Amino acid sequence: MVWERKEMKDFLISLIFPHKCAACGKILPGTRAEALCESCDKHIVPITEPRCKRCSKPIADTTCEFCEDCEKRHFLVESGMALYPYDERMQRVIRQFKYEGCYEIGDFFAMRMGKTFYKWIYEFQPDVILPVPVHKKRLRFRGFNQAAVLAEGLGDYLNIPVDAETLIRTEDTKPQKNLDVHKRIANLQKGFALDSEVIWERVLLVDDIYTTGATLEACARVLQQAGVRHIRFVCLCIGATNE
């Protein structure tokens, strides 16, 4: 009887709020466990080798270890993994997830991140997973932090503790999409802090989109100042260029 009631509830919810593909908007049958239709799932292709050994961006030259952007700069974050390129389909997915409160999209892709990167993450042996925080004003407006949804899903899948409270955003910084990497870093220089003392040695940061890496670097600076020795990241998408 319990399963019958649950199935009926899922059925009624699907009638009132049809479950749609996060990329194309096509109505999907069944429960909300899947975020993509079969067609979009085939066309949204994960990043594979060759990829940059630091940021995970696809690279064309198999003889190079790093992308052009990572060759030019020194980073506090040691390395990271991105699941998908930030193409047109993933832009629609992120828009649905980030601005329309579709939590199930985050849960779906967090599990995919866990399945894809579990070996790399376990080899790193992080003490904790930290989502990149949003400012409290933006949190009130949006209602949730998309990076925290991804981090919680990833932590649950891999059985690694998640802390969404200690690393905080102290300034509601200006929108950064039109700024180059140097201006982004300047914009974020004092944007993060720690709300309490930490004893972690290895931290895995989680965010939805990697563009220049400036946000992750700002978080890493605060963590290193507090004594964290090793910092890596996982993100859902990465842009084609950091410039």
Image: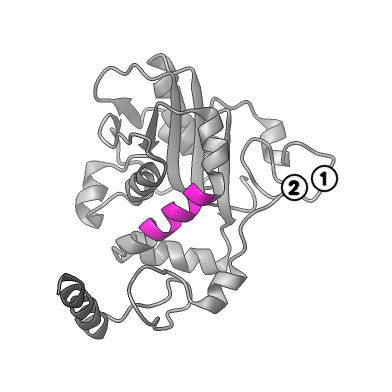
Whether pointer 2 and pointer 1 mark residues with C-beta atoms closer than 8 Å, the reply is yes
Q: Outermost residue, right direction?
A: 63
Q: Which residue is most to the front?
A: 1
When the figure is inspected, residue 84 is found, relative to residue 88, above or below; the finding is above
Name the residue tied to disc 1.
Answer: 62
At 48% from the left edge and 48% from the top edge, which residue is drawn? 114
Residue drawn at 63 percent across, 26 percent down: 74
Left or right: residue 202 versus residue 191 is: right
The quadrant the C terminus occupies is: top right
- State how far apart marks 2 and 1 are (Cα): 6 Å
Q: Which disc, if any, is residue 30?
A: none
Question: Crowding near pointer 2: few (<14 within 10 Å), some, many (20+)?
Answer: some
Q: Can you give x and y, in whole percent of width and height, for residue 158 in the image?
A: 42, 42
Q: Position of residue 95 (x, y in %)?
A: 41, 64
* Kind of residue indicated by mark 2: Pro
For the question of whether residue 203 can be seen, the reply is yes
Please give the name of the residue rendered at 49% of the width and 64% of the height, measured from the top-left corner. Answer: 91
Residue labelled with disc 2: 50
SS for tag 2?
Answer: loop
| Residue 220: percent from left, percent from top | 45, 27
Q: Is residue 4 magenta?
A: no
Quadrant placement of the N terminus:
bottom left
The segment highlighted magenta reads 106-115
